[in-house]
Image (spheres, rainbow, N blue to C red):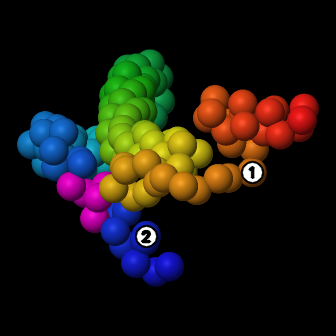
Amino acid sequence: MTQQPTDRAEQFKAEIADMKLKTGRARVETWLQLLGVVLMVVGIAIAFGAYSASLNVTATPGTNVDLLDSNSYTPLAIAGLAISVTGGFVFLRYSLAKFLRFWLLRQVYEQRAAIDEAAGRNSAGEIQRGEVRPGAVQPAEAQRGVDAVGTS
């Protein structure tokens, strides 16, 4: 029994290799996933730096220029947050794509194995003869023989 999952796994790997899928993008997707993480960290650092710089603006009595200086950091903080959110979406997109691609291939393989099992095929895809499963449709000759026996 333990040989069958190993055989199925090896057959799965062989079928994936036979599909000749483009596998060169895996490295690019890994780099883009890493870029998403870097963008998230850099965006948060920019936003926090802009916030702390706006707190360090000292108020000079009698002028409104200092208030304008502290408000000039707001667009930088918003840009940092936007960079961080963009990095999060880039990371999420490429990490989910990797996971869902493998999940879809596994679903296809498992579905094919279930269809082969329901059709009475072995792991090599050959139909097993002489085996009658409960609920299976009988050939026409066998049905006629049963009907002939049942009526006589």
Amino acid bearing label 2: Pro
Q: Residue 5 carries which label?
A: 2
Where disc 1 sits, the SS reads loop
Q: Residue furthest right?
A: 151
**Residue range of the region highlighted in magenta in the rendering:** 10-14
Neighbor class of circle 1 (other Cα within 10 Å; few <14, some 14-19, many 20+) is few
- Where, by quadrant of the figure, is residue 53 drawn? top left
> Is residue 75 one of those drawn in magenta?
no
Residue 5 lies, with reference to residue 22, above or below; the image says below
Q: Can residue 77 be seen in this view?
A: no
Q: Horizontal placement of 53 versus 150: left or right?
A: left
Neighbor class of circle 2 (other Cα within 10 Å; few <14, some 14-19, many 20+) is few
Which residue sits at x=43%, y=71%?
Answer: 4
**Residue indicated by mark 1:** 134
Residue 112 in the image, given as x and y percentages of width and height: 45, 43
Q: Residue furthest left?
A: 24
For discs 2 and 1, the disc positioned in front in the rendered view: 1
Which residue sits at x=39%, y=58%?
Answer: 123
Which residue sits at x=37%, y=22%?
Answer: 75
Residue 25 in the image, given as x and y percentages of width and height: 14, 39
